[in-house]
Amino acid sequence: MQIGMIGIGRMGGDMVRRLLRTGHRCVVYGRQAAAVEALVAEGAVGTLNFSEFIACLAAPRVVWLMVPAAAVDGVIAEIAPLLAPGDILVDGGNSRYHDAIRRSSALGHQGIRYLDVGTSGGVWGLERGYCLMIGGEPEAVEMLDPIFSALAPGSASVVPTPGRQQKGSTAEQGYLHCGPSGAGHFVKMIHNGIEYGLMAAYAEGFNILRHAGAGNREQVHDAETTPLQHPEHFRYDFNLADIAELWRRGSVIPSWLLDLSAQAFANQPSLEGFSGRVSDSGEGRWTIAAAIEAGVPAPVLSAALYQRFSSRGQGDFADQLLSALRYQFGGHIEKPTAKED
Amino acid sequence: MQIGMIGIGRMGGDMVRRLLRTGHRCVVYGRQAAAVEALVAEGAVGTLNFSEFIACLAAPRVVWLMVPAAAVDGVIAEIAPLLAPGDILVDGGNSRYHDAIRRSSALGHQGIRYLDVGTSGGVWGLERGYCLMIGGEPEAVEMLDPIFSALAPGSASVVPTPGRQQKGSTAEQGYLHCGPSGAGHFVKMIHNGIEYGLMAAYAEGFNILRHAGAGNREQVHDAETTPLQHPEHFRYDFNLADIAELWRRGSVIPSWLLDLSAQAFANQPSLEGFSGRVSDSGEGRWTIAAAIEAGVPAPVLSAALYQRFSSRGQGDFADQLLSALRYQFGGHIEKPTAKED
Amino acid sequence: MQIGMIGIGRMGGDMVRRLLRTGHRCVVYGRQAAAVEALVAEGAVGTLNFSEFIACLAAPRVVWLMVPAAAVDGVIAEIAPLLAPGDILVDGGNSRYHDAIRRSSALGHQGIRYLDVGTSGGVWGLERGYCLMIGGEPEAVEMLDPIFSALAPGSASVVPTPGRQQKGSTAEQGYLHCGPSGAGHFVKMIHNGIEYGLMAAYAEGFNILRHAGAGNREQVHDAETTPLQHPEHFRYDFNLADIAELWRRGSVIPSWLLDLSAQAFANQPSLEGFSGRVSDSGEGRWTIAAAIEAGVPAPVLSAALYQRFSSRGQGDFADQLLSALRYQFGGHIEKPTAKED
Amino acid sequence: MQIGMIGIGRMGGDMVRRLLRTGHRCVVYGRQAAAVEALVAEGAVGTLNFSEFIACLAAPRVVWLMVPAAAVDGVIAEIAPLLAPGDILVDGGNSRYHDAIRRSSALGHQGIRYLDVGTSGGVWGLERGYCLMIGGEPEAVEMLDPIFSALAPGSASVVPTPGRQQKGSTAEQGYLHCGPSGAGHFVKMIHNGIEYGLMAAYAEGFNILRHAGAGNREQVHDAETTPLQHPEHFRYDFNLADIAELWRRGSVIPSWLLDLSAQAFANQPSLEGFSGRVSDSGEGRWTIAAAIEAGVPAPVLSAALYQRFSSRGQGDFADQLLSALRYQFGGHIEKPTAKED
């Protein structure tokens, strides 16, 4: 099957590769000539402007966007006039699901079928396959089945779920039509929200292990500082790399993220290459926004998100006010900012 | 190698089975004659009182306890006088790690070597193997290596970690000497703390998906109720079983707990067999207590724990005070307690 | 000065009363004839439809809305065509601040000046005065100064802030022009967000006091239940009414909400009249939504909001999944749902 | 009445002053000769060692300790042998309530009556009076009534609570016998736990206001950064000093802590004198520990505590692991650490 890919960076490029390897024909467009050439060398048809790109695609066209969320509307504004009724436009990036509802309605007036496809896999997708969460009209979804099937990991990638009846659902292959427009990005949004929570759970646990030797540092005794009640309980010097490795087997908490934690610690046991300024790319925020609008509690996912905001200094002013208040009511002077341990 | 097991319930019984299957000799003690008999039928030596139990073990004895945390001190009080210097006593249950420090010191005066072994695996351990987190003196740990090795999953159970140098560490087999007394239960404690966080992350995510149809219920318009700003954003009816299955492949969030979620939804898509009163067995609490004593933030793990407390009605009085305050300052009358969705 | 009030329920009615008592002339519109008549008896001009209402107001008209947020757009749609350039329209309710930005722009095209006035005071406002947070064009704000001044508590209501230089700011009177359109409702939104946090802080504290006798109930000893490590630490039977009263004097935590807590406990020490189903009226949600959009951590305010969602059963499905998972990995059966204490 | 005070720092010194001004006789001991001399100049009897101190007190002696929590056991070890049956020892500092239970039992064997008195008031107590939360035997509490009454603010300090029946309780004076040993420090612990929550609620709210101009900075458009969806919603430049002042009147959130916030902003609108490294002195931690042991949710109070830990860099390693994981699965490189706004 033929597909056109706009955006051939980290994600888009590897998706094209995976499609080429499974015999699909890919037309690619990207801003970086080098990236285009690299894919051409692997069998893609390369194009450097949209009209050329569209001209290379046979009707009904399939155009897949893998561009930053903030760029999608701009690309659609340029590409939509070049499309014809019956063409399918896929947003495989990390757009907010609201946008899918709006866009599919707008493009529908033109006869263009719009699909929102939450795509997970990162730099590992080429090898592992991509998990695809799909929203939109069933007919368009069905038409793209060969593409989804090629991108997805396939059923052999994990052991079957005991007791599961719906054998035959594409969920077992790693792709799923989740519902009408927006459903794909909604499910991807929640996926990322969960991801934040899982990451934070491991991060907090390893951080406590990392501080388990707090009883070995000298105790300060003044009215400002809480001494450890039992320094003898905090005299451990744990090997985090070994513990991450250990938990991968037979415990309750093995996961792909734990595998990656084990790799991170194997590479660099004290993670000194990272400053701890953690970005967030939108879905975590939208997950919380959705939870709040629906009136559903999400304390764990929120705490995970806020930790990232704080890591970027966005809570500093709040902390300053706390210090100012402590000074106001108790005459407490801030302690110097040296780290505790 | 010979080992004596006290406590042959869900966990202890299966551990004995796994040891028997790998050629070890097991003497067992349990309160339930039927449980003892079942293991005798599989090759264990059964005993019904402690003196008989001790008499069946050759010196230096290895006695492994798999009893509830609250029962450990009582059993030790009975069994310790029957032990001899050089014997090894293992607490494989979920004791607080403080207790291991205290007990190993007390038993050390008697020449008894005490190990704390955090044991993970649940009802799946017989088949998957048990993840063992071990604390105590190196000599005793080394002596028990054949036992640990037999209980653990072994290195073939998961793919090797790329870049990991310490090949040869037992972590790759699924057991690890984590440090001095208490280290095993400390690491198990953190394991369970993380487990709570992971479970809550999935639970919150699936709960938001479960409420994604909130826009389909009728909106109430009064000053007490926040209407959905955009009901058109909440019109999804997701198949949670399929989504759980989907995420198992190629996404960022596959894990053993996700596998189990997929099984739970496969068995019962709406989980109607569960009321949602969630127990907690101690380690989650101790994780937070440790974090607080060491002055380390753990917002995600705490939120996960508190959710469990709330699920048992332990926050109800706080909620009543909120309602009372709203009545005091705003004359707000509580809405009837019907669920929203 | 003359003002027209649309919406004369709990808040609007008392605001009219306070204005009448300070010599202002009020034209009122309300759906309930009885409410209109009551205010007429106190000196207001009563009207029962919008054209009559408008006809009673002299140009440039001042129309103040005190209606539920969800009703504001509807009222504006009806009333705006009856207004003339130069008229001032005030939304004193709990609208989202986004709406003020949108409405002031739309109405501005008609020459109508739109102010968003966050109004705090509840059932106590008639006596204490109302705290007014004002957004919009300075000229219109200035024109309404006599009204704001009459509604606000005035500077004598609390002691002056030592060290404060800006004497003369209306903040000392209890009303403030906070900025352009939306600023008033933004500040009111944050006010309510903080309110949720404060309420939750007291509620959690009193709830812990309420459970301080947990050591007096019988302890259960099984692998599912965490026994109290030190029941002797939880044998208190605190008088919450006395403690609330006590803290009102000389402590760090006196507040108006603590005064109200003391009243609530004085009325009903165990709050048995309240079920604990806590409503939320929007601003708390919008506060979190604003924090998330701006990338600012707000863990305390979020936790307070989520507690309210949970109190209404919105987290139950998450809890059910936790129970289902515990059953899957550990064979744990849910304990009966009796409350613990 | 005569009282001996050990520890005449910020708190103890002013308490002696307040007692002297109300006609009580005070014997003081302190390590700093200058502090002793200052109080002698105001009428106290100064002593420089414990035997002199004890010799100056008439039996039955009343000895009040105002020393750091970590120093209390040391002082008791020195002073207890000098006391006689019937003497009263008061710990007015911030000890953990567990210690009061232990100490009152130990000292009881000697016939010494031990009271734990949680004391709130900070640098303002001399003027406002101290809020006293008292635990111990009723007889000893009664004997000290004149002292408690002199230290406390008295009933005139705030308006009476409508509907309160127990007129005559000392709670109206600002001191209260809360229960048996430990009850005083338990209630003080919860007081401080609530204090943390209240402070954090204000701090988070003001921090959001502080970032309400985020839409005015230039937006970055890449896959790593979430752009503001609606920059036009974040164009405010709020005057925090005026808003703090405003809320003191007629709103739902006036409090003593808000008064102090207004003072802090009046002194320094951008709080530039504070770095935001926030200490915690123990009671906040113990509050959470108590909540956890009793199985009671305290998400708000915990979040407030963790924010302080994070402000001291105690969560940095967790953040580093998050960055390491993002790099592992997505090839995400950390953004430079410049603050966002």
Image (cartoon, coloured by chain):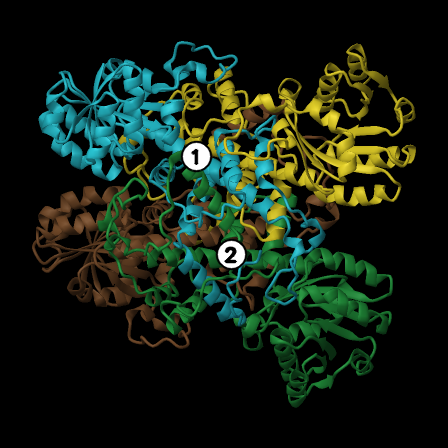
Chain colours: A green, B brown, C yellow, D cyan
Considering only vertical position in the picture, is B152 above or below C223? Answer: below
Answer with the quarter of the image where residue D48 lies: top left
At 64% from the left and 43% from the top, the residue drawn is C286
* Residue with the mark numbered 2: A308
Where residue D243 sits in the image (x, y, percent)? Answer: 60, 36
Residue B121 location, x and y as percent? 36, 58
> Is the C-beta separation of discs 2 and 1 under 8 Å?
no
Q: Which residue is mark 1?
A: D195
Q: Chain of mark 2?
A: A
- Percent x, y for residue A98? 72, 55
Amino acid under label 1? Answer: Glu
* Near-viewer residue (D37 or D270): D37
Query: Extreme front residue here?
Result: D41
Disc 2 residue type?
Arg
Residue at mark 2 to residue at mark 1: CA–CA distance: 25 Å
Q: Is residue C327 visible?
A: no
* Few, some or many residues within 10 Å of mark 1 (<14, 14–19, 20+): many
Residue B142 visible in this rendered orientation of the protein = yes
Secondary element at image label 2: helix
Coordinates of residue A167 in the picture (x, y in percent) = 61, 64
Q: Nearer the viewer, residue D67 or A280?
A: D67
- Give the residue at x 80% y 42%: C103
